[in-house]
Each structure stands twice: as C-alpha cells, then as structure tokens.
Amino acid sequence: MRQKKVLLIYPYFYTGIVKDQLFSPLGISILAGMLKQHKIDVMKLDCTFITFDEAIRKAEAYQPDITGIYVMTTLAKNAIELLKTLRDVNPNSHYVAGGPLPSLYPKKFAKEFDHVFVGEAAKSFPSFCRDYFEASDAGDFLKYIQNEKYPGLYGKMMDLNDVRRGYLSSEEIDACPKPDRSGFNHEKYQELCHQATGYKRASIMMTYGCQFSCDFCSKPIFGNKVRFRDQDNIFEEIEDICSYGYDTLWIADDLFTYNPEFLKRFCQRLIEEKWNIKWSCLSRVDGITDEMVDLMKKSGCYKVYLGIESGNNRILELMNKRTTTNGIRAGVQVFKRHGVDCAGFFIVGYPGETIETIEETLAFSLSLDLEESSFNVPYPLPGSKLYQRVSGISDDDWTIENETRFLYQSEFDENWLKKRIRETKEAMGRSE
Ligand code: B12
Ligand code: SF4
C-alpha cells in the first residue's frame, strides 16, 4: 500500500519589508516532529522564499493525503487562496486548518476546511492523522469521529460546545520530540538576519502561556496557564538549532523572564556548559532584579524586547498592563546597568487617549534612552478585549505589515501620528 502523507503549509510569502524578524515556522515544525515519531511521511512547505505557483507545484507533486495549513491574522487571505487552488489540484486530500486564527474562529474556518484544530495541536493533530491513516475505512472514521479523542478538533457537523480544547501539561510538552527543523531554507533565513542584525537567529519556545490579561492582547493558542519545559529538553533543542548554523536564539515566550528560578537555571547552564551563544527575548519590565540581569548578560543575552506601551499611567491602567511609568523606568534601568540593550514597543492612539497622552508616550520613550523603539497604532486582534470594543473591522484589512494604519474608525489622524513618530525616531537618532 502507498505510504500515507501529510503536507504542512506555512502560507507566508516574503514581502521584503521585514528583515530581522524572519524565523522558520516553529508550529508546523513541532507537528512534523510528532508526525515523524508516528512514522508518518511529512513534508513542510514554508512559502516564505517561494512564489504562490511554486508552492502549488510542490504540493501537487507531493500528493498528500492530509494537507494542514497554519493561519494567523495576516495570513488568512494567502491560506484561503492556497486552499482553493489546492482543492483543484489535489482534490482527494483532507484539508485541515490550525493556528491562532482558526482557534478564534473555528466555525468560519470549518466552512472552508474539512476540519479545524483549536489551540495547541502538538499531540492531537498527529494522533488524528495516525488514526485516520490506520482506519480500515477512512470515510467511516470521519463520519463517526470521536472528537473527544482529539482535543481541539472541530468540523462543521459538530457542536462547537463539544470541542474539548487542549492545553498540554508540562509533562506532555516534554514528551513531544524536538521540532523538526529540517528542509527549511536556513541559509536564506541566516543571510537576511545576519545582514540586518549581525546575528543568525532562530526562534524557540521554552515556556508556554501568560497569566496577564492586557486589553490589546490575544492568546489564542497558549492561553493563560503558564507551563515550563524541562531544561534538558530545551538544551537538546538548542543543540539541534546550532547544528543548522544558527548562533543566536530569539526566545519567543510571552513571559520568559517572569520566573526568576527558571531563568536562573537556564542562564547558569549556558554559562557552566560554555555554550557561547547569544540570545534575546521578550520581557515584561516588572519583577526584574540586578541579580537576574547580571546572569542574563553573562550567559549571552544582548537584548530584550519590552512591551512598554504607554508613558501615561491612566492609559497603562486602561490597557490593563499592571505597570506604572516609574516601574517601567526602574526596569529599563536595571537592564541598561548591565549592558543589555532595550527595545521598546509602544502603542499610540489607543481608544481613550488624548493628544497629550500620546505626546507623553513619545517623550517618555525618548527619556528612557532605549536602543530601539517601535510605535504602532492599536491593532484590535481578534480575541482581545480591544477587539470587542472597536467596530467596523473586516478580515480583508489584515494585510498590514509594519504599517501605521488604523483598522477601525479612530479619532486620531494617521498622518499626524506618522509625522510625530518619525520626529521622535529622528530625535532618538540624534541622542545616540
Ligand atoms: C514568533 C512570532 C512572530 C514572528 C513570526 C515568524 C515565524 N515564522 O514564526 C514574527 C516576529 C515575524 C511575527 C510577526 C507578527 N505577528 Co507574531 N507571533 C510570534 C509568536 C511570539 C510565537 C509564534 C510561535 O513560534 N509559536 C510557537 C508555536 C509552537 O506555536 P504555533 O505556531 O501557534 O503552533 C501551535 C498551534 O497554533 C498549532 N498549529 C500551528 N500550525 C498548525 C497547522 C495545522 C494544520 C494545525 C492543525 C495546527 C497548527 O499547533 C502548534 C503546536 O501546538 C506568537 C505568540 C505565541 N505565543 O505563539 C505571535 C503571534 C502568532 N503573532 C501575532 C501577530 C498579530 C503578529 C503580527 C501581525 C504583528 C504585527 N503587528 O506586525 C506580525 C505578522 C507577521 C506576518 N508575517 O504576517 C499574533 C497572532 C494573533 C492572531 N489572532 O492571529 C500572536 C498570537 C501574538 C499575539 N498574542 O498577539 N510573529
Ligand atoms: S501583552 Fe504580554 S503580558 Fe500582556 S497578556 Fe499579552 S503576552 Fe501577557
């Protein structure tokens, strides 16, 4: 009998706009690692450096029995276009959607796809593929599917209330094999990143989930429950990443620096085992101590990306950030004292802001003496509280990439904001 095959697609086509934030797709690598463990033939189709037509040709040549497509906000259009064309060229494949957007809108995606996976799918999707392939009658398997066996599985004939959303426990996460990073165009990823930053960075996740509830944030996959990976597993994965020629890690966790014990163990191991790699991460500004940052720096941390958001306490409260401007300043100073570069993310033009609070944010950003700042208008991400408050957003609007453009009717003038952002960035350049 012909070996059954799964195709996993990451439907992003490189636009040339982003230079330093390109990473090979981690979600489908995790699924592929697990599928291989089940002895299933799998191909990852990363569209980043190929064209739409090439993607279709590769998918057609592979003739998969199941085709899984990752979808997040900005990739929905590409995903649907690929799906429509693939249904013509590979009509017998079973089409499945997963990732942040289908997790938020399973009903909508189930209209287009044969099945949808909501949330973390590292265990459930590969089990579904295995059981589908092993079933003596695939049609019956789908007809009488026991969705409680596959957490997150949803199909249009199912009741959404029956979807059992799965969050893996730390033990389950650790039991997964390492992500399968083979076959990506690592040379191109490294070349572009090196040109832009001097580093060859790969992304990795060590902790899952975030317990905070910021007003603008959406956490459709990993939710609020924080889980930590076993550090032996993490270091095995780092070894694998280095074997592809990467010299730097971008830790994509929402709250990597939030647990001092976990952070300390990670840094100490990097130092003791002389890994000699660089790393950067996202971080909050609260709970940061000199002892922590000293270890971070000594272990190779060169930069942190901080969600600062605003320079006004009322707006920080409105955003439910649970920080204050004094706390932010203190946190930034700790990083700077130890020579860790700071990049700050700011949101300007939040519903409830005034021209004065925007000006305060811009002035605050300058006063912090950050190495890098990025200013965005609020993006009402589906799944966030902000999204529920603003209206008039259509899916077609989500084609933005690093643009200062409101996706809803705002009282603030985009051109004025663009000008003030440009001026602030120029002033930042002058002070360097
Ligand atoms: C790394 C990252 C990026 C990288 C992406 C590079 C890359 N190739 O991965 C960069 C920095 C470029 C980026 C940019 C943006 N990002 Co981003 N990013 C992340 C981040 C921090 C980690 C992603 C990751 O690797 N996760 C780890 C893997 C294991 O998780 P995963 O991919 O979700 O996969 C799991 C499931 O989704 C599922 N799954 C995944 N694929 C598939 C496929 C199938 C078939 C199935 C069944 C299941 C399945 O199984 C996996 C294992 O459980 C997430 C936040 C987060 N914590 O996940 C945000 C996140 C995905 N990004 C987000 C956003 C909004 C953006 C931007 C639009 C931001 C902006 N304003 O510019 C841009 C858009 C970029 C673009 N190209 O279109 C949102 C998406 C929200 C949404 N509702 O869609 C997230 C969730 C952050 C957030 N909370 O707001 N991002
Ligand atoms: S913005 Fe950061 S801290 Fe706030 S809820 Fe989202 S991931 Fe958590």
Image (tube, rainbow, N blue to C red):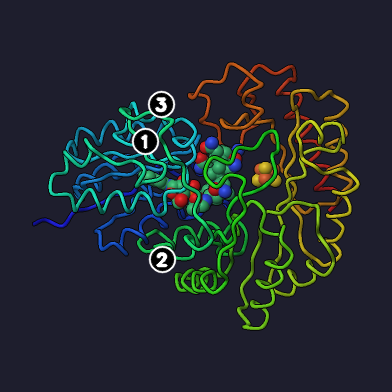
Residues 34 and 86: in front is 34
Residues 105 and 290: in front is 105
- Residue identifier under label 1: 154
For marks 2 and 1 on the same chain, the one whose residue lies earlier in the sequence: 1
Q: Quadrant of ligand 2?
A: top right
Task: Specify the quadrant that holds the N terminus.
Answer: bottom left
Query: Which of the 4 quarters of the picture holds residue 269?
Result: bottom right
| Distance from the alpha carbon under mark 2 to that under mark 3 | 32 Å
Query: Which of the 4 quarters of the picture holds residue 313?
Result: top right
Q: What residue is at 19 percent from the left and 53 percent from the top?
A: 134
| Mark in front: 1 vs 3 | 1
| Distance from the alpha carbon under mark 1 to that under mark 3 | 11 Å
- Residue identifier under label 3: 108
| Mark in front: 2 vs 1 | 1
Residues 7 and 229: in front is 229
Instruction: For mark 1, give the secondary structure.
Output: strand
Instruction: For mark 2, give the secondary structure.
Output: loop
Q: Position of residue 296 (x, y in %)?
A: 73, 69
Whether residue 366 sits left or right of residue 309 in the image: it is: right
For marks 2 and 3 on the same chain, the one whose residue lies earlier in the sequence: 3
Q: Position of residue 216 (x, y in %)?
A: 67, 34
Instruction: For mark 3, give the secondary structure.
Output: helix
Whether residue 170 sits left or right of residue 57 in the image: it is: right
Which residue is at the far left? 1
In the depicted structure, whether residue 232 falls above or below residue 281: below
Q: What residue is at 68 percent from the left and 30 percent from the top?
A: 378
Residue 15 in view (yes/no): yes
Query: Which numbered marker is on residue 177?
Result: 2
Whether residue 170 sits left or right of residue 147 in the image: it is: right
